[in-house]
Amino acid sequence: MNELTHVDEAAVSGQPKIAPAVEPKIVARKVQVFYGDNHAIKDVDVDIPANSVMSFIGPSGCGKSTFLRCLNRMNDTIDVCRVEGKIELDHEDIYDPKVDPVQLRAKVGMVFQKPNPFPKSIFENVAYGPRIHGLARNKTDMEEIVVTALQKAGLFAEVKDRLDAPGTGLSGGQQQRLCIARAIAVSPEVILMDEPCSALDPIATAKVEELIDELRENYTIVIVTHSMQQAARVSQRTAFFHLGLLVEEGPTDNIFTNPHDKRTQDYITGRFG
Amino acid sequence: MSLSVILLVLLALAVVGYVLGRSRALGSAGGDMQKLHSLPSYYGWNAALMVLIPSLLVLVVWLIVQPIVIHNQVASMISEASIEKSSLDLVMSDVKRVADGLDAAVEAGAMTADQASSIRTEFTDVRDRLGDVGVALGSDVNSETLRAAQRYREIASTGALLRLIVVVGFGLAGLAFAYMRSHRDFRARNVVERVVRWILLSAASIAILTTLGIVLSLIFNTIEFFRVYPAADFFFGLTWSPSFGGGSELGIVPLIWATLYISFIALSVAVPVGLFAAIYLSEYAGPHVRSFAKPMLEVLAGIPTIVYGLFALLTVGPLLVDAFGGGGLFGVDWMQGASSVLTAGFVMGIMLIPFVSSLSDDIINAVPQAMRDGSLGLGATHSETVKQVILPAALPGIVGAILLAASRAIGETMIVVLGAGAAARLSLNPLEAMTTVTAKIVSQLTGDADFASPEALVAFALGMTLFVVTLLLNIAALYIVRKYREQYE
Ligand SMILES: Nc1ncnc2c1ncn2[C@@H]1O[C@H](COP(=O)(O)OP(=O)(O)OP(=O)(O)O)[C@@H](O)[C@H]1O
Ligand SMILES: [Mg+2]
């Protein structure tokens, strides 16, 4: 299936706007995920290029979140969940017994669908990760890390006078950018975002999208989204999932203007999903 | 006519009402259910409720009023002289006993009903006659008491007859009324709905009214106590030495001190153990362990406190003596007997573990999964997540749980009666025996104390103090817990 799409893509690819990076950041091969008896991800192969944004689209329940959560082993926290196959981050198998999932998650950060700031101050929310990983030698260091992260997340100007106020007191969009700042603060290499804008209004969404575009420079980003427009706006490559299968993957433009698979076509023209 | 007969009659009437109301309504619709406003059974229920509710209300009022009326009627027959000799209450209880005795005699066939109402002390030894049928009377029955008792029986039997007539009359009237109304346009469903609401409401008010009644009776007796004993001495007195001969010192301070001391020890056992158990169960335990361990902990909560008391007295106390007593493990002679603050506190702590753990478990589970994911997703370990995110988020709720546990500890009785000792003492040494507010309430009210003496009445003042303290703790706890719940809604 996957080889098929690759072949197709090669056949039709005129000039993709952004060529796939020579060296992919993440390589997944024959990934299977089971929730008990439920076979949620079937044989997924995908390469995720470094320093670009890849989006996962597909109808509800097709396994986008499940696959995303495989990439930083968040599925380990679900008792019934079993993952098979191989996922490499910089050529290192992340499911190798030698790999510490806790260390891995510091490298592969995650932003969730619903903003979930901790019930702590804005400052403490961002400082949480660096403190756990001992990234700051002293107070000044920590302040610098926090301020930089907030700046990168485009939130600093809005909260600089109230860093001690509770993070839960911010607006939804601000909370989500706080969560992004929190993820950035531990200097991850990859940031996974699961529908980061679904709880936000259009203005807050625009801000987060803008932010994602800027972050691409330094991070590899994978984003799950239900908005085709959003995928088109922010991502360079797009993968379409359906019923646990990765149906089609390629440069975003190609997927939206020239899908090869009937199912992809149906989905992006709104015939199901 | 006994009460159960009345109830049976009413029940039968209600069944009849159900059947009649239902069939009349159906009949008015020509047997076509579609034409009825409500389902047929609603007409039946309407009639049954119309039978039961008014008649039962009348019955309840009657049961309350009749003894008062009888009391007043009979009391007027008692002469001033006999009231002066003892008291009206005592004479009246004699009267009642004789009346009950006569009833028993008639029932046993030792007297005819006529004899019972006509015998005179001048001709018969009533005490002997009643003794023959197994009714023991303390003193000889004088003619005044006997006559009052006979009058008592008279009024009571007329009352019972009247009661039957009136109550059943109300039942019949309700039945007739409901029967007339059972017509196809009658909105029986709405009526039943309203009645159900009132029934539920009254159930809720009974709980509240009972609490109010308890408080009122406490207040009344407490005021009585403060009339015979100065409040300042009670609240600030450092000595507790009641003596029923009079001249007691009834200072609450040593009792409160021991109560708080024991509660403190109990909480220092229960809070860490209970909290850690809750963290383990809600965060680490797999579904199998959880499904086994949680019910086990709850069984611990179901053990009667008297059993904990025995455990304190027979196991923990002697163990502590082995350790701290003369010639014990540590070679110190710090503990004289098995009863001590530490014994009671430790065992009470064990009793409170399931209390703390199951409340904390609920609260920790209420912390949204998103919090955990957020922390784990940043590369925090499980215990870092628990310590830095989950516990702070759950803290207000946990504090509430601890306050609730504290109010249980303060009110606990059996464990301290058996494990803490009986002597009131103001001391810092946890190995000494002391006694608490609750234990003293028990000891002041058991035995032959005169209920009007300050030594007995003090129990109510103690109870009132305890009530106020635990009430405040509970209010604070509920307030905190509720505030915490809102945080995640
Ligand atoms: N924690 C879980 N336990 C058991 N089954 C799960 C769990 N999470 C997801 N699943 C199952 O896995 C399948 C894929 O779910 P997933 O959440 O990955 O879908 P999704 O593509 O993210 O959907 P959505 O767009 O609605 O978020 C579904 O059938 C779902 O029922
Ligand atoms: Mg999802």
Image: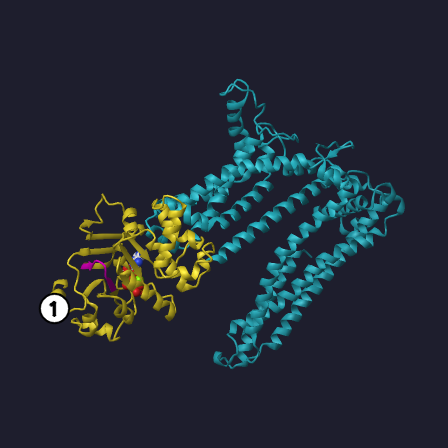
Q: Is residue A16 left or right of residue B441?
A: left
Q: Secondary structure at mark 1?
A: helix
Q: Is residue B117 left or right of residue B186?
A: right
**Label 1 near ligand 1 (CB < 8 Å):** no
Q: Residue furthest right?
A: B81
Q: Colour of chain A?
A: yellow
**Would residue B355 be seen by someone viewing this image from the given angle?**
yes
Rendered-image quadrant of the N terminus of chain A: bottom left
Q: Is residue A249 left or right of residue B244?
A: left
Nearer-the-camera pick, B195 or A29: A29
**Would residue B489 be seen by someone viewing this image from the given angle?**
no
Ligand 1 placement by image quarter: bottom left
Type of amino acid at the residue the image marks with label 1 = Asp
Does the segment drawn in magenta span residue B444?
Answer: no
Residue drawn at (59%, 35%) of the image? B261
Instruction: Give the magenta part as a residue range.
Output: A45-55
Residue drawn at (36%, 51%) of the image? A145
The residue labelled by disc 1 is A8
- In the image, the chain rendered in cyan is B
Chain of the residue under label 1: A
Q: Is A254 located above or below residue B222 in the figure?
A: below
> Residue B336 location, x and y as percent?
59, 23
Within 10 Å of disc 1 (Cα), the crowding (few <14, some 14-19, many 20+) is some
> Residue A24 location, x and y as percent?
18, 57
> Residue B316 location, x and y as percent?
51, 29
Nearer-the-camera pick, B146 or A203: A203
Nearer-the-camera pick, A122 or B182: A122
Residue drawn at (37%, 71%) of the image? A202
